[in-house]
Image (cartoon, helix red, strand yellow):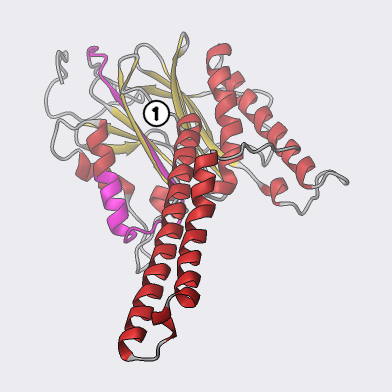
Amino acid sequence: MIRIKANPRPRRRALALGLPTVWGAVAVGYKFGCPLAEQNGLGARIVTSAVFFAVGTGLILHVRSALLRELRQARKVAGAAQSVLLRPLPPRLAGLNVAAAQLSADRGASIGGDLYEAVATEHGVRVVMGDVRGHGLAAIGTAAAVLGSFREAAHDEPELGRVLGRLDRALARHLRERARSEHPSSGQDPDSPVAEEFVTLLLLEIGGDGELSAFNCGHPWPYVLSGTRVEPLSPADPLPPLGLFPLPTDLTAADCGQLLDGESLVLYTDGAEDARDARGRFFSLQEALAEAVRDRPVSPQAILRTVFTALLHHTNGRPTDDIALLVLHNERRHQRPFLGARGTARPTTTPPQPTNRL
């Protein structure tokens, strides 16, 4: 691969080279051209020390300014990469209020190995939440391959199982290409980390009436927030993560009932529940969510703020794994049935009533 790098602007380049030269010329000119520099008196020594102190300070400030310019440029590039990979989700999506946030374990990195996306299609709102093995910058390429495939397949494929098949093939293709680039002469090395890379993934579809269907490939099930109750979406066993084993030939999405009006879904990566404090205790996401919905009404943005504040406090501001959260709140305002969202009766303290406003 040939990289062509544009030359910096002539003025900026001249300043970068000229200022240190000027400072050096001042110091040399003073030492050899000023009679005061040749004297041994106390006053002459003080003046000489002051001159060289000013020269050194100028050089340090110049280097610092150049480094800050490079840092600002690097942050702009990182921000552009983040907006492409994990682009901001719309606040509303086909009657759903949406909020998402991601926290990278790599200090100074704004993106990592977690991925999420939600799109409105003619087949319903389709959502993906995934976690690439490992964390930080090394997992960005794999996350980009999976997200790029989802953004196309979610619109093209009428069946959710075929979307999952597209994601699996995109991941396998990406890993093969990566293996060839790392071992161009001998093909994929069995001991290569690429051979052991996988992605846990949750693929979810929300129909027009709130019907939920999902494929879970080794990922934590989301939580459903209904009033002040917090419960897992499904107790079903997940499929293996993508990349470890071939998918079954007969893919049938799990029926997860309905997302009723006023309810929320919280999708997350395992970095949230695996976060530990200084004493080795795991973070309880379910308790944090229960605390977030204790005072109603609560918005998805408020849920994220509460959970991330609790997470950072629990880990003392130093999470060891990437963490991503995605909250979907149903505001479609349809009538609440007597059956629960997942097809089972729910205990209620008041008779179910039509919901006209939140």
Viewer-side residue, 21 vs 215: 21
Residue 121 in view (yes/no): yes
Seen at 16% across and 15% down, the residue is 355
Range shown magenta: 306-335
Position of 344 with respect to 30 (left or right) is: left
> Which percent across, then down, holds residue 193?
69, 51
* Residue type of the residue flagged with mark 1: Pro
Position above or below: 301 against 61: above
Instruction: Kindly give the residue lying farthest to the right in the view shown.
Output: 185
Q: Is residue 101 above or below residue 288?
A: above
Q: Which residue is mark 1?
A: 88
Along the viewing direction, whichever of 77 and 23 lies nearer the viewer = 23
The answer to whether residue 1 is left or right of residue 205 is right
Q: Residue furthest bottom?
A: 41
Does residue 326 show up magenta in the picture?
yes
Q: Residue at x 47, y 11 (%)?
A: 123
